[in-house]
Amino acid sequence: MPELPEVETVRRGLEKLIREGAIVSVVDLRTKKIRFDVPRDFKKKLLNAVFRKVTRRAKYLLFDFGEITLVSHLGMTGSWRSIATVDREADQRKHDHLYIEFSNGLRLAFNDPRRFGIIDLEKDISKSRWLKHLGPEPFDPVFAAELFKSKARAKTSTIKTFLMDQKNVVGVGNIYASEALFLAGVRPQRRAGKVTMHEWERLIGSIRNVLNRAIEAGGTTLQDHRQVSGETGGFQNRLKVYDRKGEACVNCKSPIKQTVIGGRATYWCPKCQK
DNA sequence: AACGAATCCTGTGCGC
DNA sequence: TGCGCACAGGATTCGT
């Protein structure tokens, strides 16, 4: 499901609901393991913790409780939803793995059918195994053409694979990689090392542009993505190539092509992208 | 060491 | 309607 815009949308939803200073009053963990083991003392450590803020790093949500941080990754199908007090007992769904309640009555559920998501606790987030190999955020000025042209210099893998590798730059997944490459006019199957300086400049701009517009739209809902409120996102209506195989290119009317790169469906315009 | 493939898991949609 | 198969927004782990 979720790339940076979807995770950021969820973060903003959570931020609106969880008050700073709210105390965790209920931790109801329904499974020992999602993709990886949840810490054995999860409940004990989280209960009575005082909420500070929720931030995002790459595609990870970080619930800051001061002495401890709840780390959550949505994998492909993970979601957080808020449950109204009146539905407290009634709204329990298949694949709900965790419920957290706060002193002000807010109840949250983490649901993940495919179980590719992560729920973990970290004492010191700067040492987190999940975060330490990540590249820069796409909006960080460090993500600049000169540096990335040089980083990619010796890479024989495709530019699409390079952009989706979170060690290079974070937040770009399968949908937005195709979209950004289209906006920049670069074919996804081009070798990363052969992308020119000018193309890197366009690519970085396109990535920032598409991610920003997708955040504004509340993310892309193809099937699973939901905001914390339960609403779908809106960016699926603005996709230019993803999931549009055979449809007319918005620029040149050529049929959009689909291929597989790195095992993932990839969409591009054979005329607009060089 | 770098790259691509296989893998974890459940649900959905399609062809027959 | 039912069955089998391919495929799905991620990213670690494995094999070459």
Image: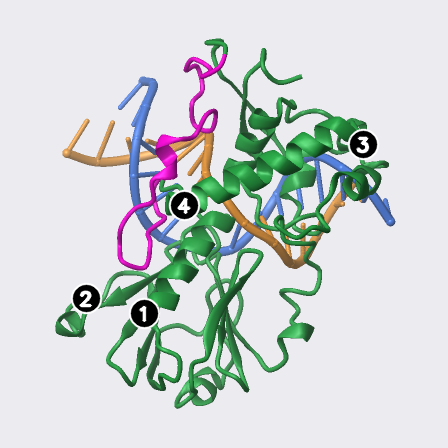
Chain colours: A green, B blue, C orange
Q: Counting residues from the N terminus, which is met first, the one under dot 3 or under dot 4?
A: 3
Depth check, front residue: A232 or A155: A232
User: In the image, what residue type sits under mark 2?
Assistant: Asp
Q: How dense is the environment of label 1, judged by Cα within 10 Å: few (below 14), some, or many (20 and up)?
A: some
Magenta highlight: main SS = loop
Q: Counting residues from the N terminus, which is met first, the one under dot 2 or under dot 1?
A: 1
Q: Is residue A161 shown to the viewer in this render?
A: yes
Q: Which residue is mark 2?
A: A91
Q: Which stretch is magenta?
A: A222-251
A163 is within the stretch colored magenta: no
Viewer-nearest of discs 2 and 1: 1
C-alpha distance separating marks 2 and 1: 18 Å
The single residue placed furthest to the front in the displayed view is A141
Q: Which residue is mark 1?
A: A17
Q: Is residue A210 above or below residue A274?
A: below
Q: Chain of mark 3?
A: A
Q: Which mark is residue A216?
A: 4
Q: Counting residues from the N terminus, which is met first, the one under dot 1 or under dot 4?
A: 1
